[in-house]
């Protein structure tokens, strides 16, 4: 029920802002683990509560997806994590952490 409310609101926002109806990607939901300890959060007040993934988690998911369109994101995330010179083995370890 809760997820349906979010998807419905995302569709309404898409209509208002001329975004694709499926701009909020729900296809990754089956692969989302429970929130890890130390998940990054924004806002403590009433209203929308936002939790977002840490850079290391985002890097791992993009490495697993192996999509060409994620290449620039992978480079940027590796840089933010001071892994710009990481070997393939070191990048693979990010996936299994």
Image (tube, grey):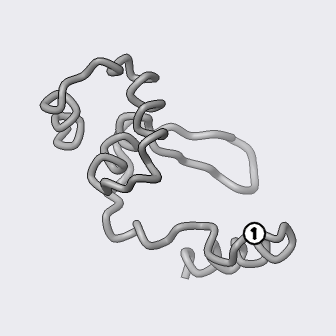
Q: Which residue is mark 1?
A: 19
Q: Is residue 65 above or below residue 94?
A: below
Q: Is residue 32 above or below residue 19?
A: above
Q: Residues within 10 Å of mark 1 (few under 14, many from 20)?
A: some
Q: Residue 1's quadrant in the figure?
A: bottom right
- Classify the position of the C terminus by image quarter: top left
Q: Residue at x 46, y 53 (%)?
A: 69
Q: Compare residues 69 and 91 and report the one nearer the observer.
A: 69
Q: Position of residue 29 (x, y in %)?
A: 40, 68
Q: Position of residue 22 (x, y in %)?
A: 61, 75
Q: Secondary structure at mark 1?
A: loop
Q: Compare residues 66 and 24 and report the one nearer the observer.
A: 66
Q: Position of residue 54 (x, y in %)?
A: 44, 37
Q: Compare residues 61 and 89 and report the one nearer the observer.
A: 89
Tell me if 79 is positioned left or right of 6 in this view: left
Q: Residue at x 31, y 54 (%)?
A: 66
Q: Residue at x 32, y 57 (%)?
A: 65
Q: Position of residue 53 (x, y in %)?
A: 46, 44
Tell me if 1 is positioned left or right of 81 in this view: right
């Amino acid at each position: 029920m809760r997820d349906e409310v979010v998807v419905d609101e995302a569709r309404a926002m898409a209509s208002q802002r001329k975004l694709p109806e499926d701009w909020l990607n729900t296809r990754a939901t089956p692969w989302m683990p429970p929130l890890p300890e130390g998940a990054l959060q924004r806002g403590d007040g009433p209203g929308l509560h936002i939790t977002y993934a840490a850079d290391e988690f985002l890097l791992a998911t993009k490495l697993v997806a192996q999509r060409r369109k994620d290449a620039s994101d992978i480079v940027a995330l590796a840089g933010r994590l001071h892994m710009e010179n990481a070997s393939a083995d070191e990048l693979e370890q990010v996936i299994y952490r």
